[in-house]
Amino acid sequence: MDMTRRTLTLGLGAMGVLSACGNGIGSPGSAKIDARVNATLSQMYSQFPGTVNLSEKAAGLLVMPLVTEAGLGLGGAYGRGALRVGGATVDYYSMVRGSGGLQIGAQQYAHVLFFMTDEALMNFRRSPGWAAAANIEYATPEKGDTLAAETTTSLSPVIAVIFGQSGLRVGATLEGTKYTRIIP
């Protein structure tokens, strides 16, 4: 597919819309991120009670309360959140992803990465820019379904739970997403 001027203009326009969305960009700092993380965890625990047990077994949680994703030919996603270890925030992170191809639309969602091993958590924290790859186990519960930390799931080093999707874009995946430590 040849990239035309129109496709490039529309893709850049989609990125402009993405940057204008209210997802914490330019927020006054860590207090706002922490409040959103608390609300996101409360929502997840009430909608999917099995995640409580999963979080108790996890070495750490990376909570992205609001990820905004948009695309028209070219697309991208952005969000900010916090890493929690032992229930306390230890660092703040941003996530970004770019994509190209046949795509159109926008969506927002929340996601939580459960680091099930100390090694997975350590690798994430030591990395200057950790990229989500195909080795993440996805647990995508439907509303009202139970999410259980089964033996096969809890053996995965990183489990992603994506929920609260709204918008006109189908699917959410974290492959190719880059997480970077920030100072809010």
Image (cartoon, helix red, strand yellow):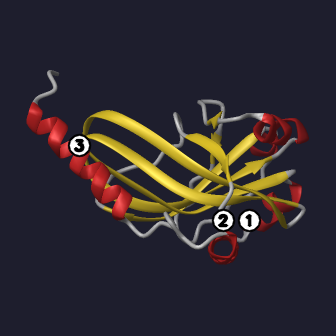
* Residue depicted at x 42% and y 62%: 108
Residue ID for mark 1: 50
Proximity of marks 3 and 2: CB atoms separated by less than 8 Å: no
Tell me the number on the disc at residue 151: none
| First-in-chain label (3 vs 2) | 3
Task: Using the image as rendered, state which of residue 34 and residue 151 is in the foreground.
Answer: 34
Q: Tag 1, which secondary structure? A: helix
Residue 11's label in the rendered image is: 3
Relative vertical location of residue 31 with respect to residue 16 in this rendering, above or below: below
What's the amino acid at mark 3? Gly
Amino acid type of the residue tagged 2 in the rendering: Thr
Question: Badge 2 local density, few (<14 within 10 Å), some, or many (20+)?
Answer: few
Task: Answer few, some or many: residues within 10 Å of disc 3's Cα (few below 14, many 20 plus, some between 14 and 19).
Answer: many
Q: Is residue 169 left or right of residue 88?
A: left
Residue 162: where, in percent of width, then height?
56, 56
Q: Of the residues shown, which amino acid type is indicated by label 1?
A: Gly
Residue at numbered disc 2: 146
